Image (cartoon, rainbow, N blue to C red):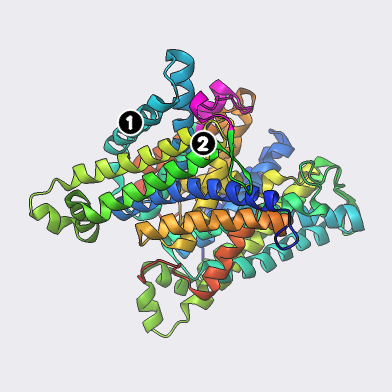
């Protein structure tokens, strides 16, 4: 018993919170990377997350390709779709007010989700946990389902890898420079439009990767991105889009806060992240990690 | 009067003539739905078109206005006018609260914050007992107008909706063309400059936001009376998306655009309703098309062609 709450219940909810937090972190990370480079908020991010899950399901259903190859293939395929969309549609908006990017990607999400609902319905399709990751281990204080542990580890790994690529490699340095001043970087001979396209593809691939991870936990259905994206926007407002690490930390932290709220104040569990956002707006309008404009 | 230019006067007269003639040709309930949506879009346009702030959470005001109007009607059996006023009041109170938080940021953040705050309202409505959860508030009586006229008659209800719509429409037009409205446009064009001229821009934004929220609440309340139902759909963010689409399609920052957009969007929904999810797909496609090729909207393009401000 901890704070009058049975240990397994507390740790169970904490783990659930950590898993939700992993998805918040991966999605808000992708949003932040795309926003830094393209200056648009990708409203369709949830739709690409959902497409990632569907890609894994389709690979298994139609071609028999299993979970682990899908974890690589689905982000590649969906990322490629993202690249095509950026090249053909989104790149036309760079000289316009940022709000048009929001409107355009919102429209894209409606089209994508509507099409999937048409062909696959809204009820959800099952996706089996791969046999290696089935079962649970006894940690002494609680039973840990292996797959859930795997999700947290994989998400952490991907988040830190993304952070390392952006902050520690020459490629990342180019990227950060192009975010600061695109025309100057172009003058140094860097193909900035290509960097932008690849960044968008990378952000989308990240969303799709999260989608594959989510497929066995939540049922694969066209609304799965919808449920996440509004919360992720609140996470982004709380964290501020200024820093990569900020997106990761606030994603995980808010997931845990949400999980704890489920234990202590269950009636607030759906709204706690939005309430935190209100508090942050009142005290520090630019977010925890945000840069002042 | 109301700051109409000559061409706008003519357009206004055409609109009023259509409003008078249409119920004898078309189904009045359909027209009432158009008018409620038109008022909602006009209110939304006040924010996005004249202050330059895109709210993605206007469903909160529309939906809450709808819930409160339906609830007062059902529980207290008040007059129809009182119920609609309660809807507007709800929008106003909620507008002050959410606006106070949202105007702290601008641009993309403003859109995300309003979306998140509206989501908060959505979850509240989902849990709160008075909204009836998934079922919503059903079988709301239309009641009487001033205790005299029975509004169960569709034509009587239609004229009430027309009065509410025209009242809101003229009020917005008056606001835009007042000195207050000029300051709003100044904020839209260059906020630091408006600040340097001594205007407290945050106050102006908050007042505009509250006015917009109030009229959205009125539109929601009216809608609840017309259809006798208030549900979670009204507060869901798809409704916010719908009003954005309506205004964008008609023409952001134009006087007649939102109304035109409402005619087009509601008609489209009406015809596509039988095809299930194709409504959403079509709406999304229109969004993409508008942003790529058609940013001024139907009325904006028309006005551009005729060299008139409509």
Residue wearing tag 1? A76
Residue A181: x %, y % from top left: 19, 60
Which residue is at a point 45% across and 50% down the rendered structure image? A25
Taking the view exactly as shown, the residue that stands out farthest to the top is A63
> Per the image, is B104 magenta?
no
Which residue is at a point 47% across and 47% down the rendered structure image? B248
> How many marks on residues?
2
Residue B55: x %, y % from top left: 52, 57
Q: In this view, does A33 lie above or below A212?
A: below
2 and 1 marks on the same chain: yes
Q: Quadrant of the N terminus of chain B?
A: bottom right
**Drawn side of residue A93 relative to residue B232, left or right:** left
Foreground residue, B212 or A112? A112
Residue A274: x %, y % from top left: 59, 59
Do we see residue B77 in this rendering? no
Judging from the image, mark 1 belongs to the subunit labelled A
Which residue is at a point 60% across and 52% down the rendered structure image? A14
**Drawn side of residue A182 relative to residue B226, left or right:** left
Taking the view exactly as shown, the residue that stands out farthest to the bottom is B198
Foreground residue, B152 or B18? B152
The span picked out in magenta is A113-135
Residue density around tag 2, few if under 14, some if 14–19, many if 20 or more, within 10 Å:
many
Between circles 2 and 1, the one closer to the viewer is 2
**Drawn side of residue B52 relative to residue A185, left or right:** right
Circle 1: element type: helix
Give residue A121's quadrant in the image.
Answer: top right
Which residue is at a point 48% across and 61% down the rendered structure image? A237
> Per the image, is A133 magenta?
yes
Q: Which mark is residue A235?
A: none
Circle 2: element type: helix
Foreground residue, A1 or B210? A1
């Amino acid at each position: 018993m901890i704070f009058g709450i049975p240990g397994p219940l507390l740790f169970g909810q904490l783990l659930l919170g950590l898993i939700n937090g992993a998805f918040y972190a991966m999605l808000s990370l992708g949003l932040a990377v795309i926003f830094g480079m393209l200056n648009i908020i990708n409203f369709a991010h949830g739709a690409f997350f959902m497409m990632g899950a569907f890609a894994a399901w389709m690979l298994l259903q139609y071609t028999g390709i299993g979970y682990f190859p899908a974890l690589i293939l689905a982000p590649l395929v969906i990322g490629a779709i993202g690249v095509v969309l950026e090249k053909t549609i989104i790149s036309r908006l760079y000289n316009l007010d940022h709000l048009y990017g929001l409107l355009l990607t919102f429209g894209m999400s409606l089209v994508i989700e509507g099409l999937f609902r048409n062909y696959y319905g809204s009820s959800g399709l099952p996706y089996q946990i791969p046999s290696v990751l089935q079962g649970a281990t006894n940690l002494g204080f609680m039973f840990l389902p292996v797959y859930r542990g795997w999700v947290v580890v994989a998400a952490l790994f991907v988040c830190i890898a993304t952070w390392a690529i952006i902050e520690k490699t020459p490629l990342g340095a180019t990227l950060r420079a192009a975010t600061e001043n695109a025309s100057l970087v172009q003058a140094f001979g860097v193909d900035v439009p290509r960097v932008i396209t690849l960044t968008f593809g990378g952000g989308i691939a990240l969303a799709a990767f999260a989608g594959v991870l989510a497929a066995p936990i939540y049922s694969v259905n066209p609304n799965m991105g919808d449920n996440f994206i509004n919360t992720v926007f609140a996470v982004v407002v709380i964290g501020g889009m200024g820093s990569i690490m900020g997106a990761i930390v606030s994603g995980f932290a808010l997931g845990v806060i949400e999980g704890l709220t489920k234990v202590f104040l269950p009636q607030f569990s759906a709204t706690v992240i939005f309430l935190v956002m209100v508090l942050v707006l009142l005290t520090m309008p630019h977010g925890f990690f945000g840069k002042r404009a | 009067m109301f700051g109409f230019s000559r061409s706008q006067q003519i357009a206004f007269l055409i609109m009023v003539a259509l409003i008078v003639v249409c119920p004898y040709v078309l189904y009045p309930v359909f027209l009432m739905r158009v008018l409620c949506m038109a008022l909602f879009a006009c209110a939304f346009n006040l924010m996005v078109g004249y202050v330059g702030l895109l709210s993605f959470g206007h469903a909160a005001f529309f939906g809450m206005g709808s819930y409160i109007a339906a609830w007062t009607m059902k529980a207290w059996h008040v007059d129809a006018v009182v119920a609609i006023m309660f809807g507007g009041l709800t929008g106003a109170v909620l507008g002050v609260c959410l606006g106070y938080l949202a105007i702290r940021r601008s641009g993309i953040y403003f859109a995300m914050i309003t979306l998140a705050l509206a989501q908060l309202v959505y979850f509240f409505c989902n849990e709160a007992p008075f909204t009836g959860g998934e079922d919503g508030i059903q079988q709301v009586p239309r009641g009487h107008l001033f205790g005299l006229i029975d509004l169960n008659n569709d034509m009587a209800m239609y004229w009430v909706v027309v009065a509410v719509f025209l009242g809101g429409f003229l009020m917005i037009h008056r606001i835009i063309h007042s000195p207050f409205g000029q300051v709003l446009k100044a904020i839209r064009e260059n906020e630091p400059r408006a600040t340097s001229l001594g205007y407290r821009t945050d106050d102006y934004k908050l007042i505009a936001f509250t006015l917009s929220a109030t009229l959205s609440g009125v539109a929601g309340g009216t809608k609840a009376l017309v259809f006798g139902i208030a549900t979670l759909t009204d507060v869901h963010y798809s409704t916010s998306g719908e009003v954005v689409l309506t205004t964008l399609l008609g023409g952001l920052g134009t006087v007649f655009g939102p109304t035109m957009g409402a005619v087009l969007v509601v008609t489209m929904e009406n015809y596509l309703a039988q095809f299930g999810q194709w409504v959403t797909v079509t709406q999304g496609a229109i969004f993409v098309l508008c942003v790529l090729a058609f940013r001024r909207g139907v009325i904006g393009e028309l006005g551009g062609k005729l060299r008139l401000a409509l």
